[in-house]
Image (cartoon, rainbow, N blue to C red):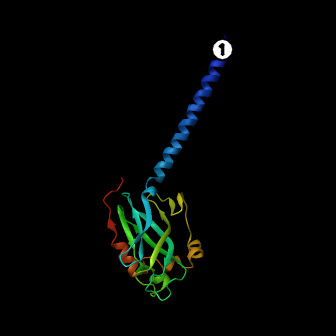
Amino acid sequence: MAAGGLFFTAVSTYYATEVAVDQLEQSREDDEKQERKQAELVSMWSERRTDGGSSGVVSNRSWDPVTDIAVIGRALPGPSVARAGRDATPFLIVFRTLPPCSRVTLTPDVLAVSLGDAWAADTGMEVETVWFRDAGGGWWKRDSARALERSRITAAELKARTGVEAITVGNVFDPRLRAVVAAAEPLKDCVK
């Protein structure tokens, strides 16, 4: 009889432990989903312009702002540029805040600080990667070729990728970029 009781206790303990492990795993998954919730609502893409060029767009469909945004992409000279046909040039755009439920359209003229005024309005902008910090302070990377991931980038890494000093291309220094960010367009479909 005692052996049966010990067996029952052992089986009960085993299943209680399995349930606790499952609950802990579910709790971790729920925490991860909650942490990713806002980051998943931030996206970026390139948009064709009527002049033949393209703009970069960064969108935040959440009701909380995102901060410390760094956008990397490639600029392709349009037909009006004397260097047309030349290889793409990497660019870096940095701005402090993307307001809640809004999008910022980065037009080619904001590249003048990092690439020079010779880049005309018909420049093609291919947005490839955006780093940002969510409302909870978490750092994220959205890449055109990969899934959303946790990632923080330093000014040194940004310079190594683009050849541009991050400190010189922010909207604090560039009035054109400051105007574009200030003109962030409100979005209709946002998630709380």
Rendered image quadrant of residue 95: bottom left
Q: Is residue 122 above or below residue 82?
A: above
Question: Which residue is farthest right?
Answer: 3
Q: How many marks?
A: 1
Going 52% across and 45% down the picture, which residue do you hit? 29
Q: Is residue 74 above or below residue 150?
A: below
Q: Is residue 107 above or below residue 133?
A: below
Going 64% across and 15% down the picture, which residue do you hit? 5
- In this orientation, which residue lies closer to the viewer: 161 or 64? 161
Q: Which residue is mark 1?
A: 4
- In this orientation, which residue lies closer to the viewer: 124 or 134? 124
> Residue 42's x, y, as percent?
43, 60
Going 38% across and 69% down the picture, which residue do you hit? 104
What is the quadrant of the N terminus in the image?
top right
Rendered image quadrant of residue 112: bottom left
Q: Element at badge 1?
A: helix
Residue type highlighted by circle 1: Gly
Question: Which residue is farthest top?
Answer: 1
> Residue 189's x, y, as percent?
33, 57
Going 30% across and 59% down the picture, which residue do you hit? 188
> Residue 8's x, y, as percent?
62, 18
Q: Residues within 10 Å of mark 1 (few under 14, many from 20)?
A: few
